[in-house]
Amino acid sequence: MPRVAEQTLEVRADFPIFARRFDGRELIYLDSGATSQKPQVVIDALADHLQNHNANVHRGVYALAQEADAAYDEARSGVAAFVGASAQTTIFTKNVTEAINLIAYSWGRANVGADDVVLITQMEHHANIVPWQVLCRERGATLRYLEVDERGELSLEELDVELERGDVRLVAFAHVSNVLGTINPVAEMTERIRAAGAVSLVDGAQAVPQMPVDVEALGADFYAWTGHKALGPTGVGVLHGRRELLEAMEPFLTGGDMISSVDFQSATWNELPYKFEAGTPPIAEAVGLGAAVTYLSGLGMENVRAHERALTAYMLERLAEVPGLRVVGPPEAERRGALTSFTLDGIHPHDVAELADRGGVCIRAGHHCAQPLMRCLGVGATARASLGVYNRASDIDALVGALMAGREIFGL
Amino acid sequence: MDDLYRDYILEHYKRPKNFGELDPHDLEALEHNPLCGDELGVHIRVRDERIEDLRFHGHGCAISQAAASIASEELKGMSLKDVGELDADWMIDLLGIPVSATRRKCALLNLKAVRGAVTGDSAWPT
């Protein structure tokens, strides 16, 4: 009999969607890796901003416009402080995809040449693959991959070997893999990357919602994450960058707000972070994200991590009871983020997700935007259960029950 | 009895008809479902403007594999002209189960491949 998880957080009541019933049943949501549910405080902050403080930013002299400015600035400060970054080097983007494209375009086009290498890993999301493919094709550079070993981890020795070649300009990698769950040794990697004279970019989409992250301590030159996986609204992502790099870079998108002055033939750029925020930014969304990180700070990110690590340990223990089920990625909860991908013999992952839904459990199935990794794993797809602060041990019990019932439907 | 995973669907999934490769073949196509990465290929042998024989290969869910298996039996002997006119309803009716919007592409992947091989038009069947 598996031990009951040491669940430390009891916050389900803060999330109004869990009051809704689906065919009379409560929501069992194990897809927070795709997007998190939203606490009432975030919904209220969004609504309050739109209802009471709405004006465009950086343009108005009237009192309402100044309120909007203050709210947007405060959101930026809060979001930056949440991950130990400076507000001036914290840029609001649409999502992580846009943040990575920004780096590939503005930094990559100025710094990656024909004989250079961009190094990524086999565990990357398409958002951290395709922009580099496009950049390398355009510049005649080479895209190389760090391998994922049979445990689902990267090798620092292999990184050393790659860096010793002397032609690596940038290394881009996930903090936490969105398929394997692997937590990569970011600080050890960025130290080596910097020592080799290369630049590091970390995709923190799956890390920031789950664990304490200090971008300064991690030593990443660029670090990107997204609001909607961290209890915030969709439409707002975050890019932190090292000041010297951001200052030396040309803008990504150009237009309003990002300029200092414009004449008929040319323009000069606004200061950081506005240089990289062309057009009206996601104001209400940023305010909502500000409320989300305030809420998470109130819980304490150490507590969030402890809660999700305990539930992940319980998940691994319970899934091991299902015959024919194989988990991908590191076997120890300690080395994993709060998501677990698996295959089930005799049932395709799409059918696994459909059968879970029969039990009222929301999980994801597919290639998780990581087709190269799927090829390394030798599978076309996996099913993935991912956790949030609101999950309980009983959600995992429901998943296991649904998988067992599904095996019966399939005559296994 | 499950609405979707009926016995005959699971039977076709576990023991699909006409699964594999066919050599030599006259027509072929390989299709992917971009949502899930599933892959389905067809090999078709033609005689007198009709499908004389066919095989499908690849990997996919119960719905896509059962659809390919069930359709393969109907497609044998069908004229190429008639194959070109098959639509989504033909496949869904043949499958005989309620297919949700999210699983529709699973059900239609095989017909997309077969029509693509025969007519060169690899659009999703409507």
Image (cartoon, coloured by chain):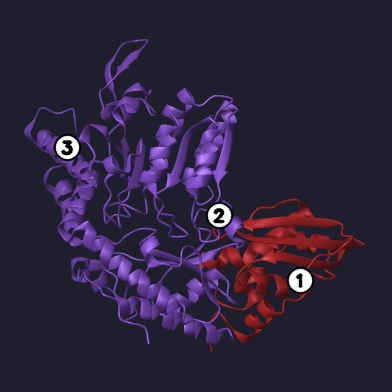
In this structure image, what is the colour of chain A? Answer: purple
- For mark 2, name the chain: A
Residue displayed at 54% across by 38% down: A162
User: Which of the two residues, A237 or A218, is positioned nearer the viewer here?
Assistant: A218
Q: Which mark is residue B110?
A: none
Q: Amino acid at mark 1?
A: Phe
- For mark 1, name the chain: B
Q: Which residue is mark 1?
A: B19
Could you tell me which secondary element the residue under label 1 belongs to? loop
- For mark 3, name the chain: A
Compared across the picture, whether A244 is left or right of A408 comes to left
Quadrant of the rendering where the N terminus of chain A is positioned: bottom left
Q: CA distance from mark 1 to mark 2?
A: 27 Å
Tell me which numbered mark, 3 or 2, is placed earlier along the sequence: 3
Q: Amino acid at mark 2?
A: Leu
Determine the image quadrant of residue B90. Answer: bottom right
User: Which of the two residues, A299 or B82, is positioned nearer the viewer here?
Assistant: A299
Could you tell me which secondary element the residue under label 3 belongs to? helix
Determine the image quadrant of residue A142. Answer: top right
In this structure image, what is the colour of chain B? Answer: red
The answer to whether residue B93 is seen in the rendering is yes
